[in-house]
């Protein structure tokens, strides 16, 4: 059985923390850069494409 990917969206960056939105959650979640990079490489999460310069600067 294949698991469905969780769509997350990068909202912004405050200092050294990244704020991301999960589906069905009205409040952004603040994570550190290490976790952000792990989530980007993970097969469990899919980051929605945005025009955000923050997301585009970290492939």
Image (cartoon, helix red, strand yellow):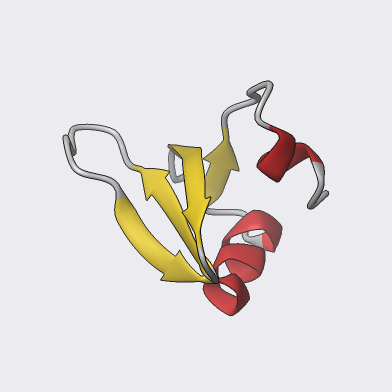
Image coordinates for residue 4, horizontal then vertical, percent: 44, 38
Left or right: residue 48 versus residue 11 is right
Q: Is residue 17 above or below residue 50?
A: below
Callout count: 0
Task: Tell me if 56 is positioned left or right of 17 in this view.
Answer: right
Residue 2 visible in the shown view: no
Q: Residue 36 location, x and y as percent?
A: 57, 64
Lateral position of residue 10 relative to residue 40, left or right = left
Note whether 9 is above or below 49 in the view shown. Answer: below
Residue that sits furthest to the front in the current view: 15
Q: Visible in this render: residue 57?
A: yes
Residue 51: % across, % down: 68, 21
- Which residue is at the far bottom? 34
Q: Percent x, y for residue 24?
A: 18, 32
Residue 33 in which image quadrant: bottom right
Q: Is residue 34 above or below residue 58?
A: below
Q: What residue is at 32 percent from the left and 41 percent from the top?
A: 22
What residue do we see at 16% from left, 35% from top? 26
At horizontal 65% and vertical 25% (from top left) the residue drawn is: 49
């Amino acid at each position: 059985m294949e698991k469905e990917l969780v769509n997350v969206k990068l909202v912004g960056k405050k200092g050294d923390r990244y704020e991301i939105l999960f589906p069905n959650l009205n409040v952004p979640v603040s994570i550190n850069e290490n976790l952000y990079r792990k989530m980007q490489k993970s097969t469990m999460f899919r980051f929605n494409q945005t025009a955000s310069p923050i997301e585009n600067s970290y492939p």
